[in-house]
Every structure is written in C-alpha cells, then in structure tokens.
Image (tube, helix red, strand yellow):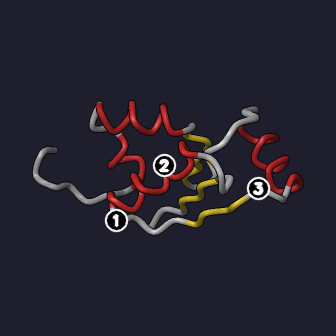
Amino acid sequence: MKKITLYTKDYCPYCKSAAALLEEKGVEFTELDVTNDQAELDKAIAISNCKTVPQLFVNGKFIGGFDDMKDLDDKKELDDILGVPCQGYC
C-alpha cells in the first residue's frame, strides 16, 4: 500500500477538490491541514519547492497540486501513481 499525504488549508477550494478526487479514487490518504501550522507547511515546501497548497505526496515523492493531479487523471496516469487497482480500462 502506498503512503499518500495531502497538505491542505481549510479555506482552499483546490484543496477540497484534491481531497474529493482522492476519495473518489477510494485510496487511503492522510490529510495534513496546515492552515495554522507553518512549520508543517515548511517541511512540505522544503521537499517540493512549492509554496502553495494542495500538495500531494506519494511514498514521499512530490506529485504536485490539484491541477497536476487532474492532468494525470485525465491522462489515466493517476491511478497507477496512487496504486488504484485496474478498473478495466488499463
């Protein structure tokens, strides 16, 4: 099972969309709300070199934000990255 972590802020609509997409995929993930936790956000920024949220990490590797997730999903690549079992189109 892959370790999936999503950094979010509670007022961010892209964060809500990213979490909804992961829920739709049926994967288990940890959502870290960094709205009031700059130190935790700084940890993610140090790895990703990205200062915005959401930030998706799979097994410690930075995948991107919501637009990146959506693009990967449109190209049918996100499921493989997340470890989602084949649903008949692979």
Which numbered tag is attached to residue 75?
Answer: none
Element class at badge 2 = helix
Q: CA distance from mark 3 to mark 2?
A: 16 Å
Locate residue 63, reporting x and y percent. Answer: 55, 40
Which of discs 2 and 1 lies nearer the camera? The answer is: 2
Of callouts 3 and 1, which one flags the residue occurring earlier in the amino acid sequence?
1
Residue receiving disc 3: 35
Q: Residue tagged by mark 1? A: 26
Quadrant in which the N terminus is drawn: bottom left
The C terminus: image quadrant:
top left
Q: Which residue is mark 2?
A: 18
**Which of the two discs, 2 and 1, labels the residue nearer the N terminus?**
2
Q: Is residue 38 left or right of residue 78?
A: right
With respect to residue 52, does 59 lie above or below? below
Q: Nearer the viewer, residue 59 or 21?
A: 21
Helix, strand or loop under label 3:
loop
Q: Label 3 amino acid?
A: Thr
> Label 3 vs label 1: CA separation?
25 Å
Q: Compare marks 3 and 2 and give the one earlier in the sequence.
A: 2
Could you tell me residue 44's position as x and y percent?
Answer: 75, 47
Picture residue at 75% right of the left edge, 41% below the top: 47
Q: Residues within 10 Å of mark 3 (few under 14, many from 20)?
A: some
The quadrant in which residue 62 appears is top right
The CA distance from mark 2 to mark 1 is: 13 Å
Q: Residue at x 70, y 61 (%)?
A: 33
Q: Disc 1 residue type?
A: Gly
Q: Is residue 74 above or below residue 19?
A: above
Report the residue at 27% width, 37% height from top: 76
Locate residue 61: give its quadrant.
top right
- Residue 21 % position (x, y): 39, 52
Mark 1: few/some/many CA within 10 Å (<14, 14-19, 20+): few
Q: Residue furthest right?
A: 39
